[in-house]
Image: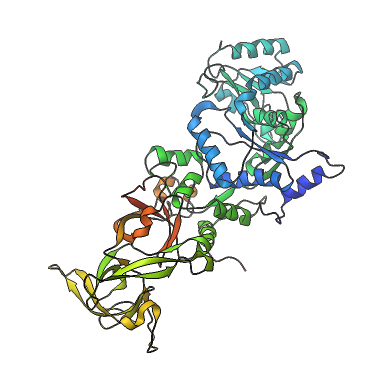
Amino acid sequence: MDENAKNFILDFVAEDIAPGGRFEGMQVHTRFPPEPNGYLHIGHCKALCIDFGTAERFGGITNLRMDDTNPAKEDTEYVDAIQEDIHWLGFDWGDRFFYGSDYFEKTYELAVGLIRKGLAYVCELTPEQFREYRGDVGTPARSPWRDRPIEESLDLFRRMREGEFPEGKYTLRAKIDLASGNFNMRDPVLYRIRYIEHHRQGTKWCVFPMYDFAHPIQDALEGITHSLCSLEYEDHRPLYDWVIEHTDVPSKPRQIEFSRLGINHTVMSKRKLRRLVEEHYVSGWDDPRMPTLCGLRRRGYTPTAVRSFISRIGVSKVSSTVEYAFLEHCLREELNQTAPRRMAVLHPIKLIITNYPAGASESFEIENNNLDETAGFRPVTFSRELWIETEDFMEEPPKKYNRLFPGNEVRLKGAYIVKCTGFEKDADGNITAVLCEYDPATRGGDTPDGRKVRGTIHWVNAADCADAEIRLYDNLFSDPEPDAAEDFLTCLNPDSLEILTGCKVERALESAAAPQSFQFLRTGYFAVDNKDSAPGHLVFNRAVALKDSFKPKA
């Protein structure tokens, strides 16, 4: 979090720890509580940056807690991935790593305490009856079991834990206010029966607490001062406070809500992301088209760019959708300053310099980054035959085309000026080679006669280069609002991935390894694929194109 940034959360926290505040003299203590049923995505990144960043701002601490109270789709694979992603972003929780299931026994005891106080009861409405009896704005909810004797509820709750009843037979409900205008307070369910194996607890438990009951208890047991969460929990805050007030917990955290992050051309529902993975619309959670942090990392995003993006969109109570182009802008802004420059030819065609001595070669010193004087230079070899981009030659060019065509001159980046003298075609009329002559007096950019050459193109030495597979990524969804569609899968972009093989890159790139990123001149910013690239099989992912379509506000 930007140390100079201001937002309403920081204002609230500063007020709370000031003299006379509710947490006067206490260390700010936050928590990040992801559910381990999928991989973290860019939306979670906003939450964790707020959780960890707020604590850091006040010299406080943050807990990492796996919210594993719902075991249906939880897995240790996700637990490990979540920790890796958070460390990648540059945050750490020290020894404060917990599981929500660590508190199952204590949460059960606190639920028993509510029953003893007459503030909870065992209800046997079926799910259908529960919906029927819920009421509406002008009609209170009802339950014929609300006045069940305390001893009877205690006995039934104990037997629920012991596995005596089938799923759906009973629930434990809080006794709050059946006529409340906030439906979350109409005697909400605190516990339900589930016969399912938990990834850590096994089959020890068959009653599981609902999130709205477990979460405030977990916060209080860990001494959390500020429970920062997304805006959909604003209507749940009265229940959060009710649980804190009426259970025997050692502290009283404060819940503060902020708006979630929405980005166009993507979805961030775990259910939808899981469907993309399980139905093989993408190659996995780390597919570079996914909004997951592991997908962004594989594509070539850096933690600095991601955190810059989160910091610059700010914190508010107003829901909004951010352009994906702004995320790209933040990455491009960083890589433009830091990425080494290299030459790569994605659609190669042979360029033959007919007056260059056969068998001869030489080397040119070309800058590694024209924006960084300290980056130095690298040697790039040159010979009679080069690879250039197919689009850098046209037999019959349109007006203002400044690249190669018969009779025109261009500068080869860092090398010589060459003049096109012709081309070769195969039997089918396809151009197979471009012919040119070089001017030896123009080595390294010299133009002793002062003539001006409008076009400069990049190249790769055909006698000294490496082959590479290059993957060009675009938005996974062509519709900017896929969530608004009846079926989000109908919005998938069929051109979101183009795989190019036989691309030609500088020989030195053979030693490149993830997470290295480069600017391929005139083409874009590319990262070594952290999964498929290997010696003898170079794979580069286009992280972001050179052209910036995002226009920052003045």
Residue 495 percent across, percent down from the top left: 36, 55
Instruction: Write down the quadrant of residue 541 in the picture.
Output: bottom left
Instruction: Write down the quadrant of residue 35 in the picture.
Output: top right
Is there any visible trace of residue 37 in the rendered image? no
Question: Along the line of sight, which residue is nearer the eye, 270 or 504?
Answer: 504
Question: Along the line of sight, which residue is nearer the eye, 139 or 512?
Answer: 512
Instruction: Write down the quadrant of residue 18 in the picture.
Output: top right
Question: Along the line of sight, which residue is nearer the eye, 88 or 355?
Answer: 355
> Which residue in the rendered view is the most extreme toward the left?
427
Question: Along the line of sight, which residue is nearer the eye, 15 or 141?
Answer: 15
Q: What is the image's colouring?
A: rainbow
Residue 521 relative to residue 131: left or right: left
Residue 197 percent across, percent down from the top left: 50, 21
Is there any visible trace of residue 424 in the rendered image? yes
> Which residue in the rendered view is the most extreme toward the right?
20
| Above or below, 138 relative to 159 | below
State the residue at coordinates (23%, 79%).
Answer: 355
Residue 151 percent across, percent down from the top left: 71, 10
State the residue at coordinates (54%, 23%).
Answer: 200
| Above or below, 380 relative to 31 | below
Residue 116 relative to residue 428: left or right: right
State the residue at coordinates (58%, 55%).
Answer: 309
Residue 69 percent across, percent down from the top left: 58, 27
State the residue at coordinates (71%, 56%).
Answer: 4
User: Which quarter of the rendering shows the C terminus?
Assistant: bottom right
